[in-house]
Image (spheres, grey):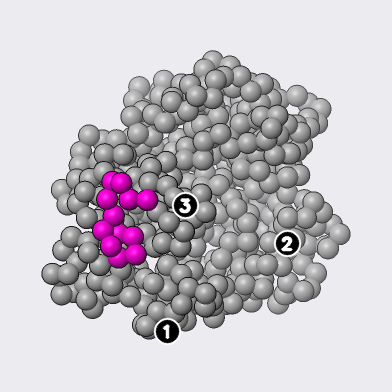
Amino acid sequence: MATLSAVLLVSATEQDPCTAATTTIAQAKTDRRNREAHVSLSTDEVQQQDVSPRPSFPSHVRRYDSGGFRVRRQILDSRQSTLADILGETTGAAENDSFKIVTIHDEVAQGAKYVVADGLRKVPPYYFTYLTYCKERWRDRNILDIFVTEFRDRDEEYYKHALASGLVTINSKLAGLDTIVRNGERISHRIHRHEPPVPAKSIEIVFQDEDIIAIDKPSGIPVHPTGRYRFNTVTEIMKHELGLYVHPCHRLDRLTSGIMFMARTAKAAQLMGARLRERTVLKEYVARVVGEFPVQEVSCDMPVVTVHPKLGLNRVKLDGKPATTKFTRLSYNGKTSVVRCRPLTGRTHQIRVHLQYLGHPIANDPIYANRRVFGPDLGKGGSGDDDDIVVRLARMGKYEEAQSVAYEEIIQHSKKAQGEKLSGEKCEICDTELYSDPGLNDLELWLHAQKYGSKIEGWEYQTNLPDWAQQNFGM
C-alpha cells in the first residue's frame, strides 16, 4: 500500500485497500435498518492512550500514546485519578465509596452507549466529569463569567446552580460564584450529560493505509468531541464502531459532508496537515445556493472574521483575516444553483460567508440563509447590524427551530416546523432543560467537500456527489 512518503493517486473508484472495512460498514447499516441497535461504549482504549496508572505525572512531563500523539493532561487525570481525587470537596464525593475506586474514564465508559433508531444515533444521558485547565483567555476571570461566555450548552441560571450546589471545583476545592480562575488551575465540572442526536449514517472509507484514512464524512456529525458532543462524533464513532483510532488532519464543519483525512499516527497527521495548508493543494466543494448564480467565474476575496464564537457566527469585515474563494456555476434548476467552490484560504465558514455576501447563500443554511436572523436580503453585501443579528441567532435552536430559504418550502408543504429547540421538559435527574430531536434543517447542509488533490505531488481523493447536487434535484 502507498504511504505518505509515496505519490498517491486515489479516487472513489479505487477502494481495494478498504474493501473489508466498507463491507463491515454496509453490513452495520443493514443491521440498523432491521432493528434498534445498542452499542456499548466501554471499549478499552489502553492500546491507543497507553498511559500508566496512578500516581499522576508532573504537569511538565509530556506523555504520548502508541500513535505518537501527545496525551493531554486532562486525559491523564481522568485515567489516573479517582472521582474522589478530582472532585475533592464536591458535594457527596467524600461520602460515596465508589468515588474512591472509580476513575472518571471508567464511569463514562460504563455509563454511555449508542442507541440507533428512527434514523438517528443517540447517546442516552450519562454522568461525565468535565476537566480542563485554565486557558490564557480565562486567566484572572470569574468562573461564572467563563462558563456563561464560553459554553452555550447551559444557561446562566444552570451554572449559578451548579456552583452553588458544589458541582464545580478548582484544584479539587469547591468553586463559588465569586471564584477567580488563575493560570494553571484545573477546573472540574460534574454533569449529567445530554448529547444531541446525530444522523445514523455510515462513515464510508474512501481509502486507507497504515498512515492515513480518507473518509466520506456524513453531514451533521462533528469531527471530534466539542461542546455538547462527545461520543456522537466522527473520531468516537470510528473508534467504537470500527475499532479505528484516528486523529483529524484538518477541520470540517459539523454540517459539512465530504472528503476528510484522519491520521493513524502523529507523524502522518503532521505531514498531511502541512500538505493541506499549502496553496498547492486543490480543494473543491459543491454547494446548492439560493437563486441564479452568475455563469462566469466569480472570485470573492473579502476578509472574514468571527463575530460571535459561541454562536458560530462569522461575517465579512474589512478588519478580518484575508480570505479568497473562487466559484463556478455547474447548473441552475429555476430556483437554486449548484456551484463549485474553491477556497484558497481556510477561514471558519469561509465558503458559507462568501456565498452569503454575494447574495447566494447555501439554500438550506440554518445560519446564513435564515430570514429570521438576517432579514429579507439575507445579509447580502454584509448588510445587517451585528448586535441585532446575534440576538436573533441566539434564539435559533433554543426557542425557535432553525430555518432557511429551502426549509421554508418544506414548512409550507408540511404545515409544521420540525427541529431542535427547548421542549419545555426537564430531566428528572439533573433538572436540565431538554431539547426536542433535531430536524432536517439541523442535520444537513448542502455543502460537500468533493475533491482534495495536488497536481504537483500527483495525488487526489474524491467522493461521489450527494443527491442534492444533481441537476434535477427539487424539480
First in sequence, mark 2 or 1: give its number: 1
Q: Nearer the viewer, residue 414 or 436?
A: 436
To which residue does mark 2 refer? 274
Say what secondary structure mark 1 lies in.
loop
- The crowding category of the residue bearing disc 1, from other C-alpha atoms within 10 Å (few below 14, some 14 to 19, many at least 20), is few
| Residue on which disc 3 sits | 139
View extreme (left): residue = 95
> What is the spatial separation of the Cα atoms under label 2 and label 1, in whole angstroms?
31 Å
Label 2: few (<14), some (14–19) or many (≥20) C-alpha neighbours in 10 Å: few
* Amino acid type of the residue tagged 2 in the rendering: Ala
| Secondary element type, mark 3 | loop
Start and end of the magenta stretch? 168-180
Q: Is residue 22 visible?
A: yes
Name the amino acid type tagged 3.
Answer: Arg
For the point 72% across and 57% down, the residue is 276
The answer to which image quadrant residue 314 occupies is top right
Q: Position of residue 325 (x, y in %)?
A: 74, 38
Horizontal placement of 255 versus 261: left or right? left
Disc 1 or disc 3, which is closer to the eye?
A: 3
Q: Is residue 102 left or right of residue 355?
A: left
Please name the residue shown 78% across and 26% down the image. 295
Q: Verify whether residue 229 appears in magenta.
A: no
Q: Quadrant of the N terminus?
A: bottom right
Disc assigned to residue 52: 1
